[in-house]
Image: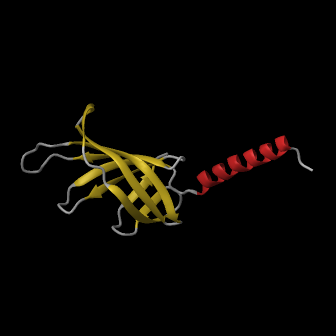
């Protein structure tokens, strides 16, 4: 017969091992960088961090308007994510703000994007390709 303390220790060890295994099997945990090209052919560099606790943080560099040369800045967002299959992640953006270029202290909240599903395929462990639009992301850590 197993004592209650031993049962608690076994359950605790199993929970820790399970959490560690889940982190190791999630191919996205870490920091990713890439470039997004929008419909107007603007290139915007991004940095996206997937944390082991199923939260994410992203920054997107917005270039100046081509005609006016004005309007550059950073869009910073945060939220939660969950793997919905081996090759798809659902992002739930809960906070988004626009900051002036070079000044992350002067930011204004803007509407968050809500739910977004991203399908991807991995090439090795440090390259992910969005299977909907071909965008490539590289793990930097």
Left or right relative to 103: residue 136 = right
Relative vertical location of residue 78 with respect to residue 88 in this rendering, above or below: above
Outermost residue to the front = 4
Outermost residue to the left = 67
Q: Position of residue 85 (x, y in %)?
A: 52, 66
Residue in view at x 40 percent, y 69 percent: 131
Q: Nearer the viewer, residue 108 or 139?
A: 108
Left or right relative to 114: residue 70 = left
Outermost residue to the bottom = 132
Left or right relative to 112: residue 33 = right
Residue in view at x 43 percent, y 60 percent: 90
Left or right relative to 130: residue 101 = left
Q: Position of residue 21 (x, y in %)?
A: 65, 53
Q: Nearer the viewer, residue 58 or 78?
A: 78
Q: Nearer the viewer, residue 132 or 2?
A: 2
* Residue 72 picture quarter: top left
Relative vertical location of residue 21 with respect to residue 130 in this rendering, above or below: above
Q: Position of residue 7 (x, y in %)?
A: 82, 47
Residue in view at x 83 percent, y 40 percent: 5
Residue in view at x 11 percent, y 51 percent: 66
Q: Position of residue 8 (x, y in %)?
A: 78, 44
């Amino acid at each position: 017969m197993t004592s209650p303390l031993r049962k608690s220790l076994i359950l605790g060890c199993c929970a820790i091992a399970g959490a560690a295994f889940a982190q190791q099997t999630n191919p996205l945990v870490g920091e990713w960088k890439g470039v997004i090209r929008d419909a107007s052919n603007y290139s915007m560099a991004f940095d996206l961090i997937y944390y082991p606790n199923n939260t994410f943080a992203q920054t997107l560099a917005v270039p100046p308007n081509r005609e006016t040369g004005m309007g550059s800045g950073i869009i910073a967002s945060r939220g939660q994510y969950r793997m919905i299959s081996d090759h798809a992640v659902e992002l739930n953006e809960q906070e988004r703000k626009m900051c002036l270029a070079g000044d992350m202290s002067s930011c204004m909240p803007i509407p968050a994007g809500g739910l977004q599903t991203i399908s991807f395929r991995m090439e090795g462990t440090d390259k992910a390709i969005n299977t909907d639009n071909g965008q490539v992301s590289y793990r930097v850590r």
